[in-house]
Image: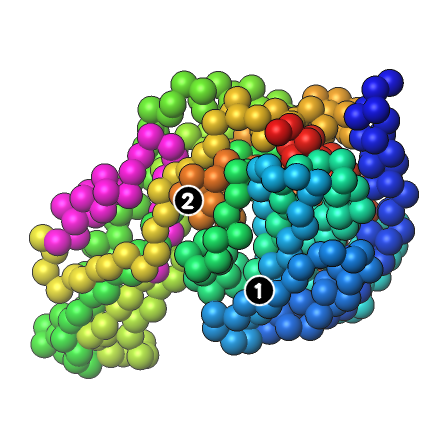
């Protein structure tokens, strides 16, 4: 064993020895309320700052673009100049909701190898794993070159404007040569890209009247339904994916679909359209003069926002009484499946999990999209989601331990190559 191999083995052993510390950190984070809205993450940031203070030499600072969402940036310098590896994650979580929880939503109950509570899997388990990996890197800073950065944000669930987008636009240290994100997924699948999306608002106008005198009115709901039908017809269309991505999705299917559900591979290749909300009218016996729908359109690689925007314009612009606008949009995005950071994640995940790990795209989006748009190769590797956003959300402790190990070892290897 070479000296470098020996140090790496000690690094891996140190990560493995921190399992109980990892579990208790995750439980402490789950107990802190960071529901978004309102998105107050100051308590979480304080708890993580306290954990980071255990190792001297870690520089931390709070960055607040829009209160109460607090972002935390932490930095460690290695033994000599080199590359920068960024760990990104989010601190805000879905609302607890009104469902019938059987565990306390902020109780962080530990039972049967699981940690229960709002945000346990999305993504306080991932944040805890990242913090432990970051702390262990700090303890071994003489063994690697460059810089490790921890960028934890307070605004992800509501779009990321005041979190990752703000950091990338205003804080140079938030960018790096590669990025790792521990958002919910699976320890058996590394996610290297995401479908694009458009969120569209469609409004229809009419003339109100009593329903008994419908001939005197013009029904806005009817106009809206007529507008939605051709928009829905976009669903199911497939795109010509770049060959490397098409092969990646096909290869991942036997591993990825048992985890994420049958049909995931097909969904990654086609346009999907979801009418998420419809509203209009005031009562049953009045012809409505206003109606509105919110539509979620997801785009596979090989499809562009400009292309879908042009098609929406062709469908909707000629319709009388109909107006529309795009509320949010992002192009499909991905990291080269052969990139070094992807190869390192796969190698370390296979070693930790005891078998080969798949690489695939994500049907949904994460803050990784902003890093890829900024030209930073990025991989999402996190715990499996269980009841994410629902009652009795939980994370598997074994998943969390694996994620901490893979993130830590991947960062150590990436920063060890000058």
Q: In which quadrant will I find the C terminus?
A: top right
The quadrant in which residue 161 appears is bottom left
Q: Which residue is mark 2?
A: 374
Disc 1 crowd, CA 10 A, few/some/many (<14, 14-19, 20+): many
Disc 1 is placed on an element classified as strand
Residue 39 locus on image (x, y percent): 57, 71
The quadrant in which residue 289 appears is bottom left
Q: Nearer the viewer, residue 202 or 158?
A: 158
- Between discs 2 and 1, the one toward the N terminus: 1
Q: Which residues are magenta?
A: 294-317
On the picture, is 403 further left or further right than 69? right
The quadrant in which residue 332 appears is top left
Is 101 placed above or below 285 here? above
On the picture, is 358 further left or further right than 327? right
Residue sitting at 75 percent across and 22 percent down?
355
Which label is found at residue 71?
1
Residue 153 locus on image (x, y percent): 57, 60
Disc 2 is placed on an element classified as loop
Is 30 placed above or below 172 here? below
Which label is found at residue 219?
none
């Amino acid at each position: 064993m070479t000296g470098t191999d020996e140090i790496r083995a000690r690094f891996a052993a140190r990560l493995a020895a921190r399992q109980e510390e990892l579990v208790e950190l995750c439980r402490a984070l789950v107990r802190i309320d960071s529901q978004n809205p309102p998105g107050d993450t100051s308590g979480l940031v304080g708890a993580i700052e306290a954990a980071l203070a255990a190792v001297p030499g870690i520089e931390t600072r709070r960055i607040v673009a829009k209160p109460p969402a607090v972002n935390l940036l932490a930095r460690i310098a290695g033994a000599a100049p080199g590359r920068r590896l960024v760990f990104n994650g989010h601190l805000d979580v879905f609302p607890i909701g009104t469902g019938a929880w059987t565990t306390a939503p902020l109780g962080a109950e530990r039972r049967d190898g699981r940690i229960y509570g709002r945000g346990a899997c999305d993504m306080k388990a991932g944040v805890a794993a990242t913090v432990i990996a970051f702390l262990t890197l700090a303890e071994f800073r003489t063994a690697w070159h460059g810089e490790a950065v921890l960028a934890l944000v307070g605004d992800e669930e509501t779009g990321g404007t005041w979190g990752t987008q703000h950091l990338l636009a205003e804080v140079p240290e938030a960018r790096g040569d590669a990025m790792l994100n521990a958002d919910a997924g699976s320890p058996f699948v590394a996610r290297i890209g995401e479908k694009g999306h458009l969120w569209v608002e469609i409004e229809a106008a009419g003339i109100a009247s009593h329903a008994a005198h419908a001939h005197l009115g013009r029904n806005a709901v009817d106009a809206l339904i007529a507008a939605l039908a051709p928009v829905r017809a976009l669903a199911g269309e497939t795109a010509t994916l770049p060959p490397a991505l098409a092969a990646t999705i096909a290869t991942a299917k036997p591993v990825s679909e048992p985890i994420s559900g049958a049909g995931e591979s097909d969904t990654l290749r086609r346009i999907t359209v979801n009418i998420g909300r419809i509203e209009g009218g005031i009562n049953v016996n009045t012809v409505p003069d206003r109606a509105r729908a919110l539509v979620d359109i997801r785009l596979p690689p090989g499809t562009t926002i400009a292309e879908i925007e042009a098609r929406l314009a062709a469908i909707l612009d000629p319709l009388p009484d109909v107006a529309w606008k795009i509320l949010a949009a992002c192009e499909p995005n991905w990291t080269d499946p052969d990139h070094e950071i992807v190869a390192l994640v796969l190698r370390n995940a296979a070693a930790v999990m005891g078998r080969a790990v798949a690489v695939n795209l994500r049907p949904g989006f994460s803050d990784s999209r902003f890093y890829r748009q900024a030209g930073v190769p990025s991989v999402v590797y996190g715990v499996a989601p269980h009841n994410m956003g629902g009652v009795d959300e939980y994370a598997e402790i074994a998943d969390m331990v694996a994620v901490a190990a893979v993130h830590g070892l991947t960062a150590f290897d990436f920063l060890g190559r000058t």
